[in-house]
Amino acid sequence: MGDVRLRGLDRDAWHSWPNHPDGWLTLCPLPSIDEFQLQAQVPPGDEREPSLDLFRRIVAERTGGMDIEITEAPWPSLYRANVRIISRYRVGRVFLAGDAAHVHSPAGGQA
């Protein structure tokens, strides 16, 4: 995943390509700045570091040749989903709830 600057998509909606054999791709316009958040699933075992070149290749392959140009990737990042669960929600007088009881993806809270 990462923040990217691009040409070729409107900023009025999230854009998603869910059915590529190597995994899904989404591009979400970020509020108040001229960037999109790129999220792409990679096949198991793919160890490539996120980069402008990799983002360009993924977008070209997974959008079916749409005219989308990634011009910059100011914040490339590797995100791996983790499954974390506590064994008990209550221990004595302590009860975990809300944000203390879960972990969510970087897409959480996007408006």
Image (cartoon, rainbow, N blue to C red):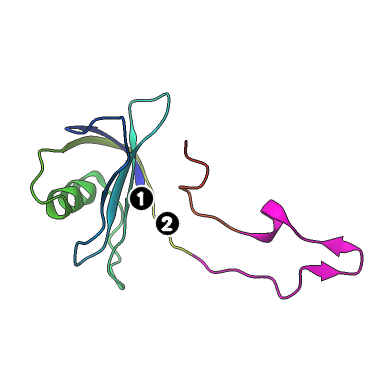
111 left or right of 22 in image: right
Residue 61: % across, % down: 13, 54
The residue under the point 54% across, 55% down is: 104
Residue 86 quadrant: bottom right
* Type of amino acid under label 1: Met
Q: Which residue is mark 1?
A: 1
- For residue 77, the mark is none
Query: Does 29 appear above or below 22?
Result: above
Residue 103: % across, % down: 59, 58
The residue under the point 31% across, 72% down is: 44
How many numbered marks, from 0 up? 2
Residue 105: % across, % down: 49, 54
Looking at the rendering, the stretch of residues picked out in magenta corresponds to: 82-102
Q: Is residue 81 magenta?
A: no
Residue 93: % across, % down: 91, 64
16 left or right of 67 in image: right
The residue under the point 39% across, 49% down is: 77
Q: Which residue is mark 2?
A: 79
User: Which residue is at the far right?
Assistant: 93
Which secondary structure lies at badge 1? loop
Which secondary structure lies at badge 2? loop
Q: Residues within 10 Å of mark 2 (few under 14, many from 20)?
A: some
Circles 1 and 2: CB distance less than 8 Å?
A: yes
